[in-house]
Amino acid sequence: MTVVVSLRGMVDELQMVSNETRAYLNKVTGEFFTIDTFGLDFMETGEDEGMEESPDWQREYYRKVREVESSGDYLMLPDSFEIHEYQIIQDFCFTIPNENTSGLFLDMLHGAGAFRRFKDLIYRYGIENDWFAYKEQAYKKIAIAWLERESLAYRDDMKRAQSE
């Protein structure tokens, strides 16, 4: 039986990806697993010194990390470089109907603190719902492209827009 991946689950997982994490999909079960910096370090070093004194949850986590690393059942999801949230933000700015407002948003994307300024502006202009819907659709496209590239079946279980 071929696994059918939840598109909602994949989008949720992709939105949690950062420079400090890697997310994986078990292509047999359809389950996702995210590895944090500690798990990534563990994967690189393989050191499990003192593991027997660790709490049960931590031993289980590292056991799962080792399984991800050694099993051919796991596929790494797109990372933060492949997702490129800055580009998604920039593309969203071009969708803002008011040309002056769009220009303001695009101007603030330069330099340190661009993400914080963007977040402040979407709330100031009351377009946060538009942004979150746009972002979710962008992540959905990334997820579908990846799933199709990997020849994996998926179900579109994304919540319908409230306006429908």
Image (cartoon, rainbow, N blue to C red):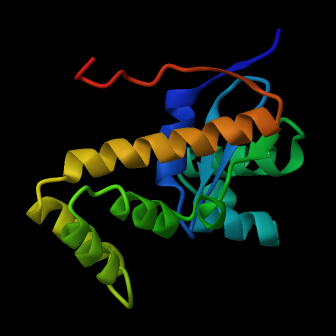
Instruction: Specify the quadrant of the image occupied by residue 28.
Output: top right
Instruction: Specify the quadrant of the image occupied by residue 110.
Output: bottom left
In front here: 35 or 148? 148
In front here: 45 or 9? 9
* Outermost residue, top side: 1
Residue at 38% of width from left, 23% of height from top? 159
Q: Would residue 91 be found to the left or right of residue 106 on screen?
A: right
* Outermost residue, bottom side: 111
In front here: 73 or 159? 159
* Outermost residue, front side: 99
Rendered location of residue 152, percent (x, y): 78, 27
Rendered location of residue 86, percent (x, y): 47, 69
Residue at 45% of width from left, 25% of height from top? 158
Residue 157 lies, with reference to residue 90, above or below; the image says: above
Q: Would residue 26 be found to the left or right of residue 92 on screen?
A: right
Can you see residue 162? yes
Residue 94 lies, with reference to residue 139, above or below; the image says: below
Residue 140 lies, with reference to residue 105, above or below; the image says: above
Instruction: Give the number of marks.
Output: 0
Residue at 45% of width from left, 61% of height from top? 91
Residue at 78% of width from left, 43% of height from top? 75
Q: Quadrant of the C terminus?
A: top left
In front here: 1 or 61? 1
Rendered location of residue 97, percent (x, y): 25, 55
Q: Quadrant of the N terminus?
A: top right
Q: Would residue 20 be found to the left or right of residue 68 on screen?
A: left
Can you see residue 25? no
